[in-house]
Image (cartoon, rainbow, N blue to C red):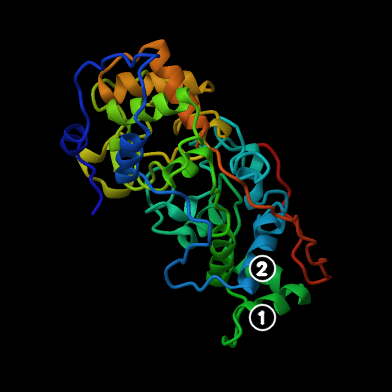
Amino acid sequence: MFKTSMLAAAAALPLLAVAATGAQAQIDDKALMEQANSLFKPIPRTIPAVQDNAVTGEKIDLGRMLFHDPRLSASQVLSCNTCHNLAMGGDDNLETSIGHGWQAGPRNSPTVYNAVLNAAQFWDGRAADLKEQAKGPIQAGVEMNNKPDVVVETLKSMPEYVDHFKRAFANESDPVTFDNVARAIEAFEATLITPASPFDQYLEGNPNALNEQEKRGLKTFIDTGCASCHGGVNLGGQDYYPFGVVEKPGADVLPPDDKGRFAVTQTATDEYVFRAVPLRNVALTEPYFHSGQVWDLRQAVAIMGVSQLGAELSDSQVDDIVAFLEATTGEFPEVEVPQLPDRTADTPFPVTMTAE
C-alpha cells in the first residue's frame, strides 16, 4: 500500500529550520556515496522487465509506430508523442497539454522517460502500469477523444499494421486488439530510460562524476529531507504525499478544485495528495507541478522547501540543489521516427477538430 496520509508524510520529513550548507564545506565522497546509495539507485542500463508483458523486439517496433501515429486519435492529429515529445524531455513543455478541439487539459503532462520505473502512472496514480496508462489518453475527450473499437478498425484497415501485430502477438488468433495496442506501447516505453547521468556515475563509484557544487546539492537534498519523498531509482514516483505538508502553496500553484488522489480513492485524507514527481531529467521538463504554473526550477525548489519541509532555503542551498538536479540528466536513447503504414480506402476518416 502507498502512504497517503498527511501524518505519514509529515513523519517522514524533518520540519525544523534547515541549517545553511557552507559553500566551502569539504565533501567526504566515501561517506556521501554510501549515504546516497542507501537512498537512491542508478538508472538501469538494460531495459527493465514489465509485468505480464514480455518486452520483445517486435512489440517495441510496433509500439514505436503506435506511439508516433496520430491516427490513434479521433482527429488523426494527436499522437502519444504530441504530449510526450521525445525530443523535448518526454513531455510537451506546456502548462497543461492541448487536446481534442484545442481543449486545455487539467494537469501538466508528466515525462514518459523512465516512467516504467514508477510504481504507478499519472499524478494521482490512477493507472497501475503503462499498459493501463496508455489506454487513458486515447479515450479521454479532452485528449485524443477516440474509442477502442475505432482504434481497432483503423489499425485493421492497414495490412502492414496487421502483419506487425501478428509478429508481435504471434500466438493469438485475433492479435489486433485495444489491449495489445496498450501492450505494444508499454513495451516501447520500457525502452525510454536515461542511464549514465553524472549522478548515476557518482552512485556507481566515480567521485569525479559530480563537481563540488553538485555534491553539495546532493548532500543538501538529503540533509534537508528532499530524499524522504524523492528517493529510489527515479528520485520519486513511488509514493503519495500531500502538497503542502507544512504550508499549502497559493491557489495558482495548487488549484483548489484539483484534489489530487482524492478523486481516485474518495478518502478525505487524500485531498491534495499527489504522487511524488520523479526528478530525473527535471531540468528539461519545465513547467513544474501538476498545475504547470512554475517555469523556473529554482522557484520550484524554493516552493518545495517552504511547502514540504517548513524551511526557507537560502539562495546558495537552492542553487546547489538545482545544480544537483541538473546532474540527474542522463543519456537519452536514440529513437528513429518510424515510417507509418499507409491508410487504405477502409481506414476511417478523421473527425474534424474544431474549437469547442
Q: Position of residue 29 (x, y in %)?
A: 37, 34
Ranked by sequence position, the earlier of labels 2 and 1 is 2
- Can you see residue 253? no
Residue 322: percent from left, percent from top: 47, 24
Q: Residue at x 31, y 41 (%)?
A: 34
Report which residue position mark 2 lands on: 62
Q: Quadrant of the C terminus?
A: top right
Q: The residue under label 2 is which amino acid type?
A: Leu
210 to the left or right of 150: left
Q: Secondary structure at mark 2?
A: helix
Residue at 24% x, 43% y: name it. Answer: 4
Name the residue at 58% across, 62% down: 185
Separation of residues labelled 2 and 1 (CA atoms):
9 Å
Q: 146 above or below 317?
A: below
**Location of residue 260 (image quadrant):** top left
Q: Which mark is residue 287?
A: none
